[in-house]
Image (spheres, rainbow, N blue to C red):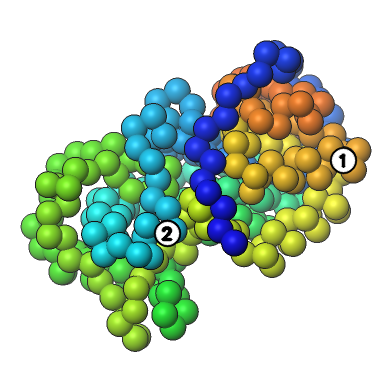
Amino acid sequence: MRTRPTLSWTPTDDLRPGSTDPEPVADALRTGGVLVLSGAGLSTESGIPDYRGEGGSLRRHTPMTYQEFTTSVHARRRYWARSHLGWRTFGRARPNAGHRAVAAFAQRGLLSAVITQNVDGLHQAAGSKDVVELHGSLNRVVCLSCGAFSTRRELAWRLEEANVGFDPGTAQLNPDGDADLTDVQVGDFTVMPCSECGGILKPDVVFFGENVPLNRVERCHELVDAATSLLVLGSSLTVMSGLRFVRQAAQAGKPVMIINRDPTRGDRHAAARIALPLGATLAALADGLNIPIDGQTTD
């Protein structure tokens, strides 16, 4: 069964205010075995907006749902036109200090693994190795008929050739890699079929209303079981796909720490929520632990 997308969550008055002291996170890192769960807020400093924060994309539009994508030719044309334009920017995004700090923690053996709700591949680009992409990756494309995979870069070349002169101008980028375009701007954009069987191509990401693959969920449950603590970075935890791991960790008595400026749906399960900017906070934590990032040494 596919679930209806959860697009919003309203904080309640009984939530504790956020802290500005990241020391609980430093203590957990010193202990080791920390499992990271990251969300869109970690990538905002790389130029990719989040969904629900100030200026988040959900204030402007509703993301594509699986049902709409699979049943509507018009929806697929709109999605691929917007996504093709967005890829020109999204594909050039680079890891920020937060991604690099996470990779540095992992290289020092302080992390057990990373679970990311993001589809941008920036953890891996920063050097993180053991990463579970909970919602998939925009770097891959899958055929819904034959199951063949191809690279997003290859599809971008095909779309460029089929849509010579497509240039609707500048548009705002969304966290899922597409850009805001009107139907007039989309026009008669040509969508490419699978080069193997002619079937429908879909980015290898979990759309709103689509289930995360069961084996991926089970792997994440195993990682929570094996971790000593859970560190949430830049996620509102509005959707159950991430919140369930926070609940699992808390029920098992494992400390949950959240670095997110705004309240989250997981705050009541957390030992601490640190309301500070992610990049600067993670870089400061690395510096305090004498862990170099960006290839530079610390004193």
Label 1: how many Cα within 10 Å (few below 14, some 14–19, many 20+): few
**Measuring 64% from the left and 48% from the top, which residue is drawn there?**
241
Residue linked to disc 1: 251
Checking the image for residue 67, the label placed there is: 2
Q: Secondary structure at mark 1?
A: helix
Could you tell me if residue 96 is visible in this image? no
Could you tell me if residue 39 is visible in this image? yes
**Measuring 42% from the left and 30% from the top, which residue is drawn there?**
56
First-in-chain label (2 vs 1): 2
Label 2: how many Cα within 10 Å (few below 14, some 14–19, many 20+): some
Q: Secondary structure at mark 2?
A: helix
Looking at the rendered structure, the kind of residue marked 1 is Gln
- Residue 35's place in the image compared with 263, above or below, is below
Please report contact status of discs 2 and 1: CB closer than 8 Å, yes or no.
no
Looking at the rendered structure, the kind of residue marked 2 is Gln
**Measuring 27% from the left and 41% from the top, which residue is drawn there?**
180
**Measuring 15% from the left and 42% from the top, which residue is drawn there?**
169
- Residue 49's place in the image compared with 4, above or below, is above
What whole-number distance in Å separates the C-alpha atoms at marks 2 and 1? 34 Å
